[in-house]
Image: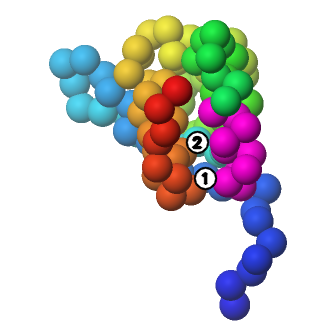
Amino acid sequence: MFSLTKRNTFKTKVHIPVPGQKDGIVEFEFNYMDRDEIVKFQGSLAGRDDDESLIEIVIGWSGVDEEFSQESFSKLLKNYPGAAGAIWAKYLDEVRIAKTKN
């Protein structure tokens, strides 16, 4: 039966671009936001860096050689510049919300 109560978290695999190689695949666990929460979150993005923003929705991962932490997540985003866009795009795809202009 379909439930109208939203889930608190969900997991999905994200393809992380790796220059000169096949994409790395990481399974992320995300906080689930409803439509109003996503709009509010998108409105808060101006002037914030990717680390600060995405750490609010990413709460864990598997398939990575380091445990998830704010430090290791920042390392991922620093070492793989395409990761932030891939993570956010997959999140929006999963919750089926079209991107809006900032």
- Direction from residue 93 to residue 71 in the image, left or right: right
Mark 2: which amino acid? Phe
- Do the numbered discs 2 and 1 sit on residues whose CB atoms are within 8 Å? yes
Q: Is residue 67 above or below residue 14?
A: above
Residue 99 position in % (x across, y down): 47, 42
Residue 97 position in % (x across, y down): 52, 53
As drawn, which residue projects farthest toward the front?
101
**Nearer-the-camera pick, 29 or 62:** 29
Mark 1: which amino acid? Lys
Residue 11 is tagged as 1
- Direction from residue 100 to residue 73 in the image, left or right: right
Local packing at callout 1 (Cα closer than 10 Å; few below 14, some 14-19, many 20+) is: some
Q: Is residue 46 above or below residue 87?
A: above
Query: Which contiguous range is marked in magenta?
Result: 31-42
Q: Main secondary structure of the magenta part?
A: helix
Residue 28 is tagged as 2
For the residues labelled 2 and 1, the Cα–Cα distance comes to: 6 Å
The answer to if 39 sits in the magenta stretch is yes
